[in-house]
Image (spheres, rainbow, N blue to C red):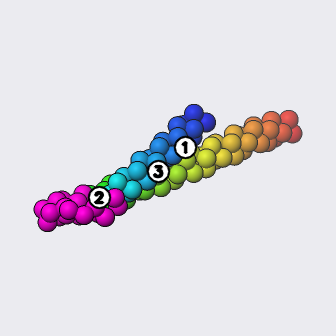
Amino acid sequence: MDKIKKESGALSSELNAYRQQAEAKLTSLAAARGLDAAARRELQELQLVMQAALAQVDVLARQAALADLLQHRLTQQEEVLAALQVVGRALCLLFVCL
């Protein structure tokens, strides 16, 4: 589980770095003079595609965080179940002894 968390954190950092690089390049291209109308349209389309891709990355990051939370809660539930099983066995032994 720790390995997954480390890999997830590293991937998140890497994605943020790519995002910043892509946004900087798109901003630079948008500010460039001398682009013809077709190039500007393509740049606008690229910006829309990039925004959609970044939105997908955000969704995936939220899903990963939710999966991590669910895994943590599942582990807690398993611990509670194990404790209840111990108590149940102890109660059975108590009733058998009575």
Residue type at numbered disc 2: Leu
Percent position of residue 23, x then y: 38, 57
- Give residue 97's quadrant in the image: top right
Residue type at numbered disc 3: Asn
Disc 3 target residue: 16
For residue 68, say whether it is visible.
yes
N-terminal label among 3 and 2: 3
In the image, 78 versus 87, the foreground residue is 78
Question: What residue range appears in magenta?
Answer: 27-48
Percent position of residue 53, x then y: 32, 54
Q: For marks 1 and 3, give the one nearer the viewer.
A: 3
Disc 1 target residue: 9
State the SS at label 3: helix
Main secondary structure type of the part rendered in magenta: helix
| Magenta span contains residue 46 | yes
State the SS at label 1: helix
The Cα–Cα distance between marks 3 and 2, rounded to whole angstroms, is 20 Å
Percent position of residue 46, x then y: 24, 57
Quadrant (top left/top right/bottom left/bottom right) for the C terminus: top right
- Give residue 54's quadrant in the image: bottom left
N-terminal label among 1 and 3: 1
Disc 2 target residue: 29
For residue 96, say whether it is visible.
no
Percent position of residue 68, x then y: 55, 47
> Residue 43 got which mark?
none
Mark 1 is surrounded, within 10 Å at the Cα level, by few (under 14), some (14 to 19) or many (20 or more) other residues, namely few
N-terminal label among 1 and 2: 1
The Cα–Cα distance between marks 1 and 3, rounded to whole angstroms, is 11 Å
Q: Are marks 3 and 2 in contact (CB under 8 Å)?
A: no
Mark 3 is surrounded, within 10 Å at the Cα level, by few (under 14), some (14 to 19) or many (20 or more) other residues, namely some
